[in-house]
Image (cartoon, grey):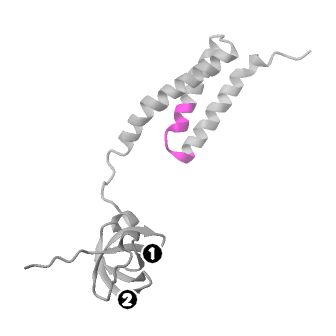
Amino acid sequence: MFPDLTQYLWIAWLVFVVIFVIVELLTLEFTFLMLAAGSLLGGLGMNLLGAPWWAQIGAAAVLAALLLFTIRPLLLKQLKKGADPTPSNVDALHGLSGRVMIAFVDGAGTVKLDNGETWTSRLAPASTGAALDEGDRIVVTRIHGATAEVAPVERREDA
């Protein structure tokens, strides 16, 4: 009375491949590309060879896992090969020094960094109790949204 739906399983494999490729085009991380290749070669390939449905799923899973853990890292390494290693944006601010523009009250104040930017700031947790007055040198330890977390620069006294 009911038709054998396993004869139409090849359509499901093609749908999986198309969906995985579309998601890969949106994410560009090579994860769904590996899943698409596993579905195409493992799932659809085993289907065309006449394997049962459970063998098709197993082959697709094993092949996708192998591709994820072997080929994907190599592709990501090649993709990032020509990237500029210089930190930019907020990452470039970590470790940058500057001066206090408005004295710190209750652990919050304003600093001007050596790159010319003025930031609202607060003291780093490790520096609690330190008094920062106008003109004192600081170093950025962290960025929280639009607030720079800073620590005072150790003053060296020359004898």
Cβ atoms under marks 2 and 1 closer than 8 Å:
no
Depth order, front residue of 153/21: 153
* Above or below 39: residue 145: below
Disc 1: which residue: 147
Amino acid at pointer 2: Ile
Depth order, front residue of 76/58: 58
Residue 21: x %, y % from top left: 58, 37
Q: Quadrant location of residue 141?
A: bottom left
Q: Quadrant location of residue 134?
A: bottom left
Residue 151 appears left or right of 39:
left
- Main secondary structure along the magenta-highlighted residues: helix
Disc 2: which residue: 102
Say what secondary structure mark 2 lies in.
Answer: strand
Q: Is 156 contained in the magenta span?
A: no
Say what secondary structure mark 1 lies in.
Answer: strand
Residue 138 appears left or right of 42:
left
Region in magenta: 26-35
